[in-house]
Image (tube, rainbow, N blue to C red):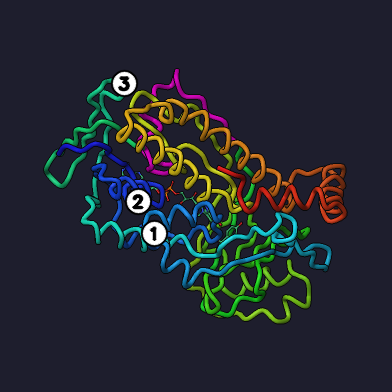
Amino acid sequence: MKTKVCIIGGGPSGLLLSQLLDLKGIDTVLLEKRTRDYVLGRIRAGVLEHGFANLLREAQCGDRMDREGEIHEGFFIAHDGVMDRMDLDLHTGGDSVIVYGQTELTRDLYEARERMNGTVIHGVDDVQLHELTSDAPFVTYRDGEDSVRVDCEYVIGADGFHGVSRPSIPADVLREYERVYPFGWLGVLSETKPVSPELIYAKHERGFALCSMRSQVLSRYYIQVPLTDSVDDWSDDMFWEELKRRLPAEVADRMQTGPSIEKSIAPLRSFVAEPMRYGNLFLAGDAAHIVPPTGARGLNSAASDIQYLYRAMVDHYENSDDAGLDAYSEKALARVWKAQRFSWWMTNLLHAFPDAISYDQKLQETDLAYLFSSDNALASMAENYVGLPY
Ligand code: RFL
Ligand code: PHB
């Protein structure tokens, strides 16, 4: 096969870029290891920045999001039996976020790719990247017995944290920065009415909890658990009981419970790989950086990478201008690190750290008390949560 841009990974990053480039007449081939159903079965993000929403509209994929997504102008932080509200609208001068599931937007992107007859190949094995620093890079993969070669001008590594693209960059070029947290999030999806019209982030001595949603009949809840726990350790009853214990009584009392329709544990990790370009390979999204989900930044950071990369590719192909491609890594990383800082800060603010000394706990309490005593602190949190400018 021959194409201009070979994209590895059919998550939101890869799909969005292929859709945007195809709309500009720039030919892409997208290679995804898993089946479409498998990709759509992963329950992940739920909170989108408006910058991301605009990019989805530009990709002609925003209709359902605009119909079914919910605008959220604030969220709650529950602590010490009380609920404090973060008014995003007030503290950002009119900004907000959209609650619309990653599963839904990935489905919208797959459908858009289908409508345009985009080349999306599922079930590829043994993807390998070759000659990345030459003018003629290529990608090979196995399809059953066959070995397939894709010749291209650029390779996009959008294959997530466990993909093959990042490890294709030589170790003496790549720098990795990582923090692994000593806990994970146990998430449950249930066909129940969300306990609150706005998200509740809860800090509790037994551990963090989050009440989120996908719609008015579909709730998404999380609790902090030790890394040693597995999903089998948590029956639905145990989950609901523990979730309620970490919430103010008035919230717990009105919690609707029901059978889980999905239950999974995600370990929390911060990670950045630099640079995000090697020769004609460009990394984007989780392939290059991971955040703990506390600040709802992961998918949104992936979207800002795609926005920079898309504009840079269009400049290259339409105007023979490579300034955007040359600046991509530096520009993307500047925003990525701010999302890292915010996610790290919000994780530290709200979780119970097993090895925290009493001094750390006092500082954590003071951080929260300061937040809700200062309009400047609230404004800082709000501008990060709705997404810093691209
Ligand atoms: P993905 O979604 O991991 O997609 C990568 C794709 O690449 C495929 N792949 C390969 N394909 C071909 N060859 C190979 N060798 C391959 N290896 C892998 C994989 O099968 C996969 O389909 O990365 P992408 O596209 O960069 O998207 C990133 C987002 O998925 C991620 O950042 C977010 O889900 C993070 N996240 C959140 N982000 C937000 O902005 N807001 C949130 O509210 C939010 N909540 C969350 C989250 C992530 C969570 N988990 C489970 C980590 C909540 C959770 C619980
Ligand atoms: C979610 O709904 O899955 C979600 C929402 C907010 C977060 C993390 C996850 O900060």
Q: Residue furthest left?
A: 146
What residue lies at 51% left-to-right and 25% top-to-bottom?
Answer: 175
Q: Is residue 174 above or below residue 313?
A: above
The image's mark for residue 12 is none
Q: Are marks 3 and 1 in contact (CB under 8 Å)?
A: no
Range drawn in magenta: 157-178
What residue lies at 70% left-to-right and 59% top-to-bottom?
Answer: 88
Tally of numbered tags: 3
Work out how far the residue at label 2 is from the one at label 3, CA to CA, in angstroms. Answer: 24 Å
**161 in the magenta segment:** yes
- Judging by the rendered image, the residue that carries numbered circle 3 is 133
Disc 2 CB within 8 Å of nearest ligand 1 atom: yes
Dominant secondary structure of the residues highlighted in magenta in the image: loop
Q: Position of residue 177 (x, y in %)?
A: 57, 30
Work out how far the residue at label 1 is from the one at label 2, CA to CA, in angstroms. Answer: 8 Å
**Mark 2 closeness class: few <14, some 14–19, many ≥20 residues within 10 Å:** many
Q: Amino acid at mark 3?
A: Thr
**Mark 1 closeness class: few <14, some 14–19, many ≥20 residues within 10 Å:** many
The mark nearer the N terminus, 3 or 1, is: 1
Q: Amino acid at mark 1?
A: Thr
**108 in the magenta segment:** no
Q: Position of residue 269 (x, y in %)?
A: 57, 43
- Judging by the rendered image, the residue that carries numbered circle 2 is 15
Q: Based on the displayed image, in which of its 4 quarters is residue 201 positioned?
A: bottom right
Disc 1 CB within 8 Å of nearest ligand 1 atom: yes
Q: Quadrant of ligand 2?
A: bottom right
In the figure, is residue 228 to the left or right of 345?
left
Image quadrant occupied by the C terminus: top right
Q: Is residue 115 above or below residue 281?
A: below
Q: Based on the displayed image, in which of its 4 quarters is residue 182 positioned?
A: top right
